[in-house]
Image: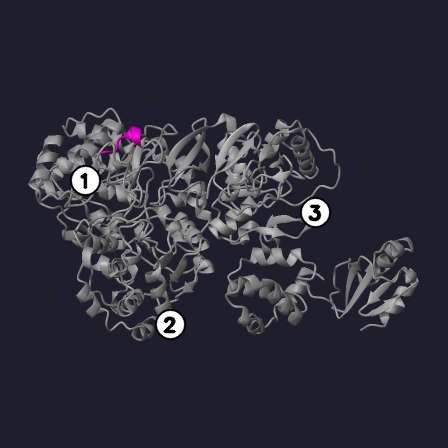
């Protein structure tokens, strides 16, 4: 269809048919006021503040819902329009408590702004005021519904985007209100405290508690940062005044979270200002930590590590790196450990995701989630299995919902009811731990009904015949017996997934640890490969990690056998490249994994351990063996922002800056390298991890010369093919997804487009094994109890020092 | 009726009966109003445990169900009495003293308009116009009109209903 030409305030414009007058005006930079309009919610047209005058039209039209017409002539600020808007504002003020002097929203309030714009100081219509009690029951925000203007945006965000279903319009007429069912306090509703109602409220009806009396919007500085919790890496703005964070808002234009957040991003940052922060280096003396000078602490570390290495050999040292520190810091950490002559470098948190890494590496040759977060919203079918993204990765849950609202088939295969079932087309409440049987049966149906993508299977995969044979016995009837599902349910799930043009599988990187191990992940990959749902946009397998920089830590070579970018130690050219760049010899011998180290118990060959930003003692609810192991070491250094359960066992504690206090990059689960800016000065004598490591390296006698994180990043890029086209100045707007091989490359949205890292995708023979369920006391405990994190594999080090610990209904990961 | 009295009544709700009403509508969220009507027909009102049950079975948030029920005047969230008193608030009745009639009924029953007595004997409601202005002021008890009232006639009329 051809474009439609119209005139708005004397300016001509051509827009696509179906565009609203409001959208067209915005394209021209004309500011039409709105209250109830939100671009991602269905058209509302309720508030009427956006009315404009259209020549030859009988009445004023609401520009947010009126489509453009050919040769339309629109006036957005005519006398008639202004009078109508003034009347509208007078009516709103007739029932609005005008306490702007103390209202927290002053300066950021649409009602105030429009009253200012049109010179409306008070109402012409005196009448009743609502007199509703405040809802002050929860830890996070205050609801003063007397100020609500009933725009309905909070209801839309809650019901449609988040799906919490906590609030809706209640009653009608003058007493119409917004709130939970039966007028319960918000605390007792199904609210998940994502804070998106607050972020989008045009007036002061919803006020976060932390902000009260702390500062006006124009007094705060807004600093872009990356959320420090899960691996989606949402973009946030930290609102800072006098070296204190007084609020957080989502970055509206972020390609990752598009203005959405969850409770962790919105409210979870207050640990930064916790009284429990370590503010100076500490050495344990007679069982008690004593603050010491930096010189003393560094001397102590160098002496003890050298002592252990000279007595037991270089491999007596092991480094455990953080899943939260920046890429630059993790890179320097492994560089330091390797420069000290050992490849004993690993991550403990990574082990709670080991089966995801193993399964994906086997099948596709790359452990990372295949596609971008936002692609889920545009797919044709979603299979959610072994996960509840609403609890572990809420933004991903929002995208799955969006796909369902747009008409995608949504199959939810989890043992107990989760929120996504509300919008699903198929709910498969299978018996816990029987996922592999279901997946095999789906493969069976897909093959026997000829729903697989033969062309893709022929060209891009290997092992099809073995798979076909292996899943022969997994008829729907057979699998029904194992899973407790109905045969027909299994068939329709398989058909829905296989017959959609594009389909995604959403699980969790922790899922394999409790259901079938790496075989579960291989079974997921089998389905994706069978149907050609990998290597294309809006397809793929999503196994997001639990921690914000676990992907980055893996990329930075926190493995005993590979260097940055998964370059293998066995490759002499690789070793030579790094030796030359670092000026040290790189050992060819693979290091020990942390699992092997801990398995060694008292006889472990590891005598000294350096743990940076990792809390193995508390991971997965804690394990006495790990405590015993760490106590048994000759020397333990822990670098962290708190005296964690692990740090309490250390000989030396080195303080570190929190995420908001430092510059650095983080790589999220869609391989997006993102820049986070410093917003605060660190407390006490605290420095960022990278600065500590540079200093320590000098103490060890290495000549490291970095002016700051940017130079460290440039070194990473020069040594890591996937990162080689990335530099700080390219990361300012929305980051870049690796592989990004050169400076002109715009990043890689999804993996495996033309080939897999391993050549062809590999079908694996996997079998349902009832005994594959984890034994009690395994590092990963599992709970499908509604209201708790599906995968309690993380340590809660940050969240338990935040107000979000008050809220257990959603993800409280790290 | 007090919230405690309603809560006590709600304890004895048989949710199996709700299930049999919902059964034909499972998966059809757009049928929420007919479901609420049928459930109300069965129980006489929409008890909270029933609303919560419908919310779970139909995958409709409780907030949305509550929004629907409080929007339409036909839905009642509290039990209704065996006898419904409707006091006419039309112009003619108003001029002829209907506020005094209401006042007297409220006094006798110890409830306000819109409420039900704890013994479930009466529910008191106000209506816009009954349509027999010649009898003003008028009330209806169930299907019986009682006209040309004065406050002192009220007690005898109410005594006639059990």
Res. A308 image quadrant: top left
Q: Residues within 10 Å of mark 2 (few under 14, many from 20)?
A: few
Asked whether A54 or A668 is in front, the reply is A54
Do discs 1 and 2 share a chain?
yes
Which label sits in the foreground, 3 or 2?
2
Q: Are marks 3 and 1 in contact (CB under 8 Å)?
A: no
Q: How many angstroms separate mark 3 from mark 2 (CA)? A: 51 Å
Res. A420 image quadrant: bottom left
- Dot 3 corresponds to which residue? A174
Q: Quick one: label 1 or label 2, which is nearer the N terminus?
A: 2
The kind of secondary structure element at disc 1 is: helix
Which label sits in the foreground, 1 or 2?
2
Q: Position of residue A142 (x, y in %)?
A: 56, 42
Q: Quick one: label 3 or label 1, which is nearer the N terminus?
A: 3
Q: Are marks 1 and 2 in contact (CB under 8 Å)?
A: no
The kind of secondary structure element at disc 2 is: helix
Q: Residues within 10 Å of mark 3 (few under 14, many from 20)?
A: few
Q: Is residue A166 above or below residue A217?
A: below
User: Residue at the location (28% across, 67% down)?
Assistant: A450
Q: Residues within 10 Å of mark 1 (few under 14, many from 20)?
A: many
- The magenta stretch spans which residues? A725-730
Q: How many angstroms separate mark 1 from mark 2 (CA)? A: 47 Å
Q: How many angstroms separate mark 3 from mark 1 (CA)? A: 63 Å
- Dot 1 corresponds to which residue? A564
Q: Position of residue A436 (x, y in %)?
A: 28, 65
Asked whether A496 or A588 is in front, the reply is A496
- Dot 2 corresponds to which residue? A488
Which label is found at residue B26?
none
């Amino acid at each position: 269809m051809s474009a439609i030409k119209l005139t708005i305030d004397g300016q001509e414009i051509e827009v696509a048919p179906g565009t609203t007058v409001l959208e067209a005006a915005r394209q021209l930079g004309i500011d039409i006021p709105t209250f109830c309009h939100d671009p991602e919610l269905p058209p509302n047209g309720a508030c009427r503040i956006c009315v404009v005058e259209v020549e030859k039209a009988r009445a004023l039209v609401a520009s947010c819902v009126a489509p453009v017409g050919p040769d339309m002539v629109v006036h957005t600020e005519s006398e008639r329009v202004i009078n109508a808007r003034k009347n509208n504002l007078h009516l709103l003020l007739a029932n609005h408590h005008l306490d702007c002097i103390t209202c927290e929203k002053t300066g950021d309030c649409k009602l105030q702004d429009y009253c200012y714009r049109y010179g409306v100081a008070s109402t012409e219509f005196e009448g009743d005021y609502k007199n509703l009690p405040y809802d002050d029951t929860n830890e996070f925000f205050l609801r003063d519904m007397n100020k609500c203007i009933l725009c309905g945006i909070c209801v839309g965000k809650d019901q449609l985007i988040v799906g919490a279903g906590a609030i809706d319009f209640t009653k009608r007429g003058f007493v119409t209100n917004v709130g939970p069912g039966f007028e319960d306090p918000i605390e007792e509703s199904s609210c998940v405290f994502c804070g998106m109602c607050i972020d989008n409220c045009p007036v002061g009806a919803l006020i976060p508690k932390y902000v009260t009396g702390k500062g006006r919007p124009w007094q705060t500085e807004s600093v872009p940062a990356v959320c420090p919790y899960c691996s989606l890496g949402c973009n946030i703005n930290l609102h800072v005044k006098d070296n204190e964070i007084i609020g957080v808002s989502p970055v509206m234009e972020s390609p990752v979270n598009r203005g959405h957040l969850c409770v962790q991003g919105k409210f979870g940052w207050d640990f930064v200002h916790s009284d429990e922060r370590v503010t100076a280096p500490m050495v344990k003396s007679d069982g008690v930590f004593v603050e010491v000078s930096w010189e003393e602490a560094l001397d102590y570390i160098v002496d003890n590590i050298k002592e252990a290495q000279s007595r037991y050999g270089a491999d007596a040292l092991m480094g455990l790196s953080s899943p939260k520190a920046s890429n630059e810091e993790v890179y320097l950490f492994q560089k330091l450990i390797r420069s000290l002559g050992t490849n004993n470098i690993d991550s403990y948190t990574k082990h709670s995701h080991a089966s995801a890494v193993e399964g994906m590496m086997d099948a596709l040759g790359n452990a990372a989630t295949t596609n971008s977060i936002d692609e889920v919203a545009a797919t044709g079918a979603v299979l959610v299995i072994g996960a509840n993204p609403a609890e572990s990765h809420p933004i991903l849950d929002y995208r799955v919902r969006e796909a369902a609202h747009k008409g995608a088939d949504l199959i939810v295969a989890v043992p107990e009811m989760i929120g996504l079932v509300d919008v699903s087309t198929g709910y498969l409440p299978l018996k816990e731990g029987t996922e592999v049987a279901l997946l095999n049966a789906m493969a069976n149906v897909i093959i026997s009904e000829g729903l697989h993508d033969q062309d893709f299977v022929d060209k891009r995969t290997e092992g099809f015949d073995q798979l076909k044979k292996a899943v022969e016995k997994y008829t729907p009837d057979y699998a029904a017996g194992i899973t407790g599902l109905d045969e027909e349910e299994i068939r329709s799930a398989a058909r829905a997934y296989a017959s959609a043009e594009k389909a995604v599988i959403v699980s969790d990187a922790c899922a394999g640890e409790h259901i079938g191990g790496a075989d579960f992940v291989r079974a997921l990959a089998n389905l994706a490969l069978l149907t050609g749902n990998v290597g294309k946009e809006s397809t793929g397998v999503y196994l997001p990690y639990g921690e914000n920089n676990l992907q980055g830590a893996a990329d930075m070579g926190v493995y005993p056998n590979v260097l940055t970018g998964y370059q293998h130690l066995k490759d002499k050219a690789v070793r030579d490249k790094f030796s030359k760049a670092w000026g040290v010899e790189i050992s060819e011998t693979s290091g020990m994994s942390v699992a092997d180290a801990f398995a060694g118990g008292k006889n472990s060959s590891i005598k000294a351990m350096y743990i940076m930003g990792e809390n193995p003692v508390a991971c997965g609810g804690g394990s006495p063996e790990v405590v015993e192991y760490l106590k048994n070491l000759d020397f333990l250094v822990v670098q962290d922002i708190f005296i964690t359960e692990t740090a309490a066992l250390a000989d030396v504690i080195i303080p570190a800056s929190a995420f908001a206090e430092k510059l650095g990059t983080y790589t999220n689960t869609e391989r997006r390298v993102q820049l986070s800016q410093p917003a605060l000065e660190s407390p006490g004598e605290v420095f960022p991890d990278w600065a500590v490591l540079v200093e320590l390296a000098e103490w060890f006698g290495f000549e490291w010369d970095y002016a700051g994180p940017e130079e460290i990043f440039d070194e990473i890029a020069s040594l890591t093919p996937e990162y080689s086209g990335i530099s700080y100045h390219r990361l300012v707007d929305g980051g870049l997804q690796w592989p990004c091989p050169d400076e002109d490359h715009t990043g890689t949205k999804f993996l495996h487009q033309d080939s897999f890292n391993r050549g062809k995708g590999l079908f694996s023979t996997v079998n349902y094994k009832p005994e594959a369920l984890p034994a009690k006391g395994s590092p990963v405990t599992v709970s499908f109890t509604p209201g708790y994190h599906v995968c309690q594999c993380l340590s809660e080090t940050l969240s338990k020092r935040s107000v979000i610990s008050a809220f257990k209904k959603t993800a409280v990961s790290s | 009726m007090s919230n405690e009295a309603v809560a006590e009544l709600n304890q004895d709700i048989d949710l199996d009966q709700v299930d049999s009403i919902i059964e034909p509508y499972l998966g059809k969220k757009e049928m929420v109003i007919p479901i609420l009507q049928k459930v109300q027909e069965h129980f006489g009102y929409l008890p909270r445990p029933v609303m919560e049950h419908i919310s779970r079975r139909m995958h409709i948030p409780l907030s949305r169900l509550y929004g629907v029920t409080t929007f339409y005047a036909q839905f009642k969230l509290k039990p209704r009495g065996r006898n419904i008193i409707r006091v006419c608030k039309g112009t003619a009745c108003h001029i002829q003293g209907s506020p005094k009639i209401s006042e007297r009924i409220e006094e006798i029953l110890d409830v306000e308009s819109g409420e039900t007595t704890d013994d479930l004997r009466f529910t008191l409601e106000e209506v816009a116009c009954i349509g027999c202005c010649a009898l003003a002021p008028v009330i209806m008890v169930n299907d019986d009109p009682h006209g040309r009232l004065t406050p002192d006639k009220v007690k005898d009329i109410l005594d006639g209903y059990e």
